[in-house]
Image (cartoon, grey):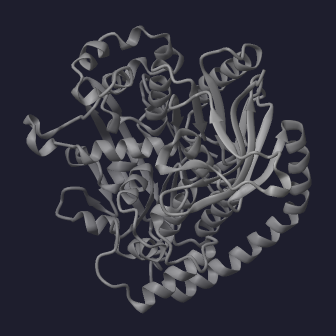
Amino acid sequence: MNSNLITINNCRIENSRETVISQINWNFQQNQAWLVIGPNGGGKADFINALAGYSGLKFIPNEINQNNIQEVPMYSSTFGNSVEIVSLERAAKLIQEERENDESDYVEGGVDIGRTGRIFIAEGLVENPKKNPKVLELSKTIENYKEIELCGIQKILDRGLKYMSTGEIRRTLLARALISGKKLIILSDPFAGLDVNSRGILLNFFNTIAENQIKSPESSTQIILGMERWHEIPDSITNVIEFREKQVSFIGSRKEYESLREERNKAQQETSKNLKEELSVELNETVKETFVLQNQDTIQNETLVEMNNVNVGWDDHKVLRNLSWKLNKGEHWLIQGPNGSGKTTFLELITGDNMQVFSNDVRLFGNRRGSGETIWDIKKQLGIVSYRMHVEYRMLGGTSLLNVIVSGFRDSIGLYGAATDVEIAGAKKWLKLGGFEGRENESFGNLSYGEQRAVLILRSAVKCPKILILDEPCHGLDEQNREMILNLISLIAEAGTTTLLHVTHDPSEVLDCEKHILQLIPDQDPMYKVIVK
């Protein structure tokens, strides 16, 4: 009896235009828990999307090799179309849909909250949800499903999807996948951006499901885990398939892969040290050559941002309450707090993306918001990496990497008007710093999620802004890119022209220069705490 749940013998992955991965041989058997891993752009995302039939990707049998006819090309899956991916990419697409369908200009009060969590989950229970009247009825009983509590989303069911934090929306996606009875759920980078409590909930969930699928292969739900990094791999993983340079680079047991990683890490340690030294030299040269005239004031105690008794919320929900805080030049801050605590809202008061800034005493660069400055006056002094920024750039997917970087000079989403020679030269230097040399004409939309994130970080730093705002900057980055980006951010901070505001839930991503911590604590009074190391 064949125990394979998925069989892939001598197949390729292709889309409507080209072959993406030329050959794969892989079997997903009962009693196995698989990890799919690999660097950004290496083929991991293509493989995962093909398993779910996303993005037009599919497995196609190759021609039979007459010298090896026992390898009969074939693809089969016991899951059929009952596959769901829960990922940063899927969450970004969902927010993009909500933005495109926003009708705030046409509704009373000027606010269209879009689909709520409960409506979105109910849509997964019916066919043709946009035309099915059962959606509203089903949505009223969504909290009765045990999966709602399992995913910890009871309190956010009536919140609009576009008002959820990154962690909240991915837990909502997971709940929908579980409730809708999908037979195979692929969790891609599930721990990125989750707070400690949410990580614990998800880790326990994964281990429980994985142990069940090993002990009871007839279980209705199977799980495959996709990760960019080996960081926080659950104990229940039994097998690993790795992709590099658009091909399978490893396939085997967890123990075998751990041995391979040990060998690689020994060789990588000395290389990493040399790369950081080279990066430091290149960054200093880039700053001097291209941006030496920007942000050269030497006032060390200049107040960049000041908030006095700030209150932000909607309806009866208070996101920030009585917050007073000050950012001085050269003070690099770490912003902490659980998912939904208001970290993104806090940053949006600075970037100008939250209109409640005008009803509060928020001062940027000495001027109170609403005193006559334009949004462009503010943005030209900021560099921003955020989930919102990423979503907006994904909506312009055809923009070249060069133009994405150049747009950082102009504070625009996309590039309007020809780039100058100076901008082009500067952008190419930053692409080289990020490992994208020679790829300036590639389309942003064709990059993996992690590669897109790396490019947006370069874009945010291109003008050496007074404040660099980093909202979970390492989302989706593989180990090598993560190390490179964290080194780059540290070196930018050391240069002295830019002050960091950094949000991360991952302790390993906290930088040595971040001596000031703002902790946001929901449901307590006061709702925040300041720590100076």
Residue 291 versus residue 118: which sits nearer the camera?
118
In which quadrant is the N terminus drawn?
Answer: top right
399, above or below 324, in the image: below
- Nearest the eye: 332 or 447: 447
Q: Tally the marks.
A: 0
> Along the horizontal axis of the image, is 103 left or right of 193?
left
Task: Using the rendered view, name the quadrant where residue 213 is placed.
Answer: top right
Q: Is residue 298 above or below residue 524?
A: below
At a point 84% along the width and 41% down the height, the residue shown is: 252
Which residue is painted at 34% across and 69% down in the image? 414
Give the image location of residue 140, x and y in percent: 29, 12
Residue 420 seen anywhere in this rendered image of the structure: yes
Q: Is residue 329 visible?
A: no
Percent from the top left, x then y, of residue 272?
A: 80, 65
Quadrant position of residue 115: top left
Q: What residue is drawn where x is 44% and y is 41%? A: 91
The residue most toward the front is 66
Question: Looking at the picture, how far across and down is residue 527, in whole percent?
Answer: 43, 30
Relative horizontal placement of residue 488, taking residue 180 as reference (left or right): right
Where residue 257 sits, quadrant-wise, is top right
* Left or right: 428 as drawn, with respect to 222: left
Measuring from the top left, give residue 70's x and y in whole percent. 83, 45
Residue drawn at x 64%, y 68% is 491
